[in-house]
Image (tube, grey):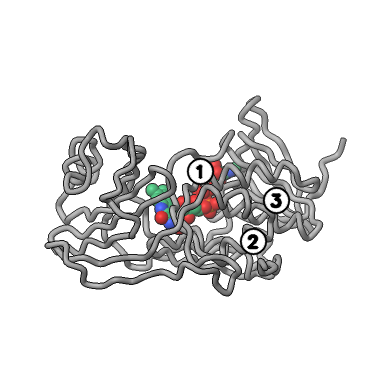
Amino acid sequence: MPNPLYDVAVIGCGPTGAILAHLLARQGLTVLVLDRESGACTLPRAVHFDGEVMRALQWIGVAEKILPLTTTHPGMRFVDATGDTLLDWPRPQDTGPQGWRASYRFHQPDLDAILRDTLGALDTVTLKTRCEAFLFEEQPDHVALRYEDMAIGRVRHAKARYVVGADGARSTVRRFIDTPMEDLGFHERWLVVDVELTRDKPDLGRHTVQFCTPERPATYSPGPGLRRRWEITVLPGEDSTVMASPDRVWALLAPWLKPGEARLERTAQPAALDARWRSVRGRGQRHRHPVEPGRGRGAMTRRLKVRGLGRSPVRR
Ligand SMILES: Cc1cc2nc3c(=O)[nH]c(=O)nc-3n(C[C@H](O)[C@H](O)[C@H](O)COP(=O)(O)OP(=O)(O)OC[C@H]3O[C@@H](n4cnc5c(N)ncnc54)[C@H](O)[C@@H]3O)c2cc1C
C-alpha cells in the first residue's frame, strides 16, 4: 500500500504536539504524530497553567478529565528571612473571563497521559510511539520524512504537507531547519525539587511562597494531592551535581521537611532558554516562547490557540 500523504506530521507527543494534533484533527485534517517514547514522561515538570490554557483544554475536550487532578491555591506570599510577610498577592478564586479560574496547579504527567490517551479516539490522528524522526526533505508540495520504528529497528518513510517540530528542548527539527535558540539572559541556577509527602503536612500551607532570603532565595509551590515543589537558588561556586545529591537536598529542605516526611521524586535544573521555530516547509511564522517561572507550558499551549487553530467556546 502506498504511503498516505498526511496534512500535518507532528514530531513529538509532549503537551505541545498532543494539543496541536487535537486542534488540527478538529479542523478535519489528517495528522501523523511520531514520538520516540512508548508513553508519556512520568517525571514532574510543569506545575501550573492558567484559565486560558484550561479553555484550550476544554476546546479539545479534556478539561473535565484534568480538572479533578488539579488544585487551586489562594495566592502567593513573599516573606523575608524572619518569615514576616513583605507582600501578599491573593489570586482570584472565582470563575474569570475565560470561563475558568485564573490559576490551576497540576502534575504534568497526568495531563500528558490524558492528552495521549484521548488522541487515540480521533479518527484522523495516527499516533506512532517508539518512532524517532531523523530526516526531513522538502519536496515542492510536501515533506518526505524518515523515522526509525524503534520497536523493530526498521527505517520507515512518511509524507506530509507540513511538518511541525514539537520535539522539545533538544529538538531535531529545530536543528534541521537551522533556527537558533535565543538566550534571554537568565543565567541563575535554580534547583527544582519535587517531593510527594508521605502524609499531609498542613503547616506548609496552600499559598505559593517566595522566600526572599538574600543568602538563598527559594520558592515553595503546593501541588495536587501530596505533591509539593521547592525551587532553590544554587549559588555561584556551588557544584550542581553535589547540590542535587539526596543528602544535600534534604539539608536544603530542612527548614520545611524532615526525611521520612516525603519521598524525593525529582531534582533537576531546567534550562531557561527561548526557542524560535517555524514549520519545515517554511510557511509558519516564528514563535517565541518566553520562559518565566510556571509559564513555559502555558505559553506554548496559548501559542497554539492564538495561531487560529481553534476558538475555544467560553464555558457557561
Ligand atoms: C524539571 C522541570 C520543571 C519544569 N517546570 C515547569 C513549570 O513549573 N511550569 C512550566 O510551565 N513549565 C515547566 N517545565 C517545562 C515544561 O515541562 C515544558 O515546557 C513542556 O514539557 C514542553 O512541552 P513540549 O511538548 O514542547 O516538549 P516535551 O514535553 O519535551 O515533549 C517533546 C516530545 O518529543 C519527543 N521527541 C523528541 N525528539 C523526537 C524525535 N526526533 N522523534 C520523535 N519524537 C521526539 C519526546 O519523546 C517528547 O515526548 C519544566 C520542565 C522541567 C524539566
User: What is the spatial separation of the Cα atoms under label 1 and label 2, in whole angstroms?
Assistant: 27 Å
* Percent x, y of residue 35: 61, 41
- Which dot marks residue 109? 1
The residue to which callout 2 is attached is 279
**Does residue 157 lie above or below 163 as drawn?**
above
What type is the residue that disc 3 sits on? Ala
Res 132 quadrant in image: top right
Q: Is residue 287 left or right of residue 253?
A: right
- Tell me the crowding category of disc 1: few under 14, some 14 to 19, or many 20 or more residues within 10 angstroms, Cα based: many
Which badge, 1 or 2, is on the more N-terminal residue? 1
Q: Looking at the image, is mark 3 or mark 2 earlier in the sequence?
A: 3
Where does the C terminus fall, quadrant-wise?
bottom right
Instruction: Locate the N terminus and report the quarter of the image it occupies.
Output: top right
Foreground tag (1 vs 3): 1
The image position of residue 106, as x and y in percent, is 47, 51
Residue at point 33% right, 71% down? Answer: 89
Q: Quadrant of residue 81?
A: bottom left
Q: Please, what is the three-letter code of the amino acid marked with disc 1?
A: Pro
- Residue tagged by mark 3? 9
Q: Residue furthest right?
A: 1
N-terminal label among 1 and 3? 3
The residues tagged by marks 3 and 2 sit, at their Cα atoms, a distance apart of: 10 Å
* Element marked by disc 2: loop
Residue under the image location 62 percent in, 57 percent down: 57
Provide residue 282's location: percent of width, then percent of height: 66, 65
Q: Amino acid at mark 2?
A: Ser
